[in-house]
Amino acid sequence: MKAPLLMTLTLCLLSLVSAHAKKYRITLENNWNVQDHLSTPQSAHFSPVVAVSHNRQYSLFQQGGLSTTGMEDLAERGRTANLLIELGLASTAGHIDDVVETQNMFIRNQTSQTFEVEITPEHPYLSFASMIAPSPDWFVGLNAMKLFSEETGYFAGTEKAIDLMALDAGTELGDVGGNFSVNNEANLVHETIFTLLGNGFHAPFARVSIELIQ
């Protein structure tokens, strides 16, 4: 009699956890243009977006912190393999729930793209990043936006899109407005991640909207 009872309790607990999970639709809107950003090369695009839901023990990137190998690869070349390995290790450690990778977004024929991320009370934070390509090591992203709290429940969604300014991964030289090139020298000593400033960086490269869907 104990085994069926234990199985029933386990299924109930799994159902309870599942019931607490919520899906969010994330919309990334392109705002890369010649007037604000000095240039839009023929190949201008955003790399695949890598998005995660996670707990407070994990950080995809942090201004004032150093880029991981995975973030360096994403910011410099739009490559996701090493970043996905890092996310796999963090997932095994229990710090990450959902991982999403999208396709490239080309600014000349795509004004926006959407993807969905699952948020749970145990993994209430949303983070994502996408390379501004081509560029030395520039990217746009959102770090650790909390979409659930015990006090207020689930975040209802954005009323207005959030501006995403150009961020620098601190791994390559060439941080000049309009320098949309991947052929840049490496920083011998990596700098910390920071927001790019000056001519060509005053306007957001993209905007993001967040919608609670289920």
Image (cartoon, rainbow, N blue to C red):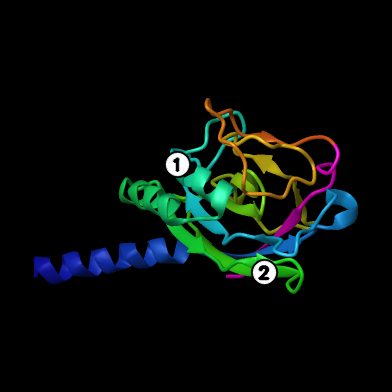
Which quadrant does the C terminus fall into?
bottom right
Q: Which mark is residue 187?
A: none
Q: Residue at x 55, y 55 (%)?
A: 78
Label 1 element class: helix
Residues packed near mark 2 inside 10 Å, few (<14), some (14 to 19) or many (20 plus): some
| Residue at which label 1 appears | 69
Label 2 element class: strand
Classify residue 2 by image quadrant: bottom left
Q: Which mark is residue 113?
A: 2
Q: Residue furthest bottom?
A: 109
Q: Residue at x 46, y 46 (%)?
A: 70
Residues packed near mark 1 inside 10 Å, few (<14), some (14 to 19) or many (20 plus): few
Which numbered disc, 2 or 1, marks the residue closer to the eye? 1
Left or right position of 59 against 130: left
The range drawn in magenta is 199-214
Point out residue 15 in the picture as x, y percentages from the top left corner. 37, 68
Classify residue 170 by image quadrant: top right
Of mark 2 and mark 1, the one earlier in the sequence is 1
In this view of the protein, which residue sits in the foreground, 91 or 125? 91
Q: Residue at x 68, y 64 (%)?
A: 27
* Residue 84 counted in the magenta span: no
* Residue 213 counted in the magenta span: yes
As drawn, 153 above or below 173: below
Which quadrant does the N terminus fall into?
bottom left
Can residue 1 be seen at all in this image of the molecule?
yes
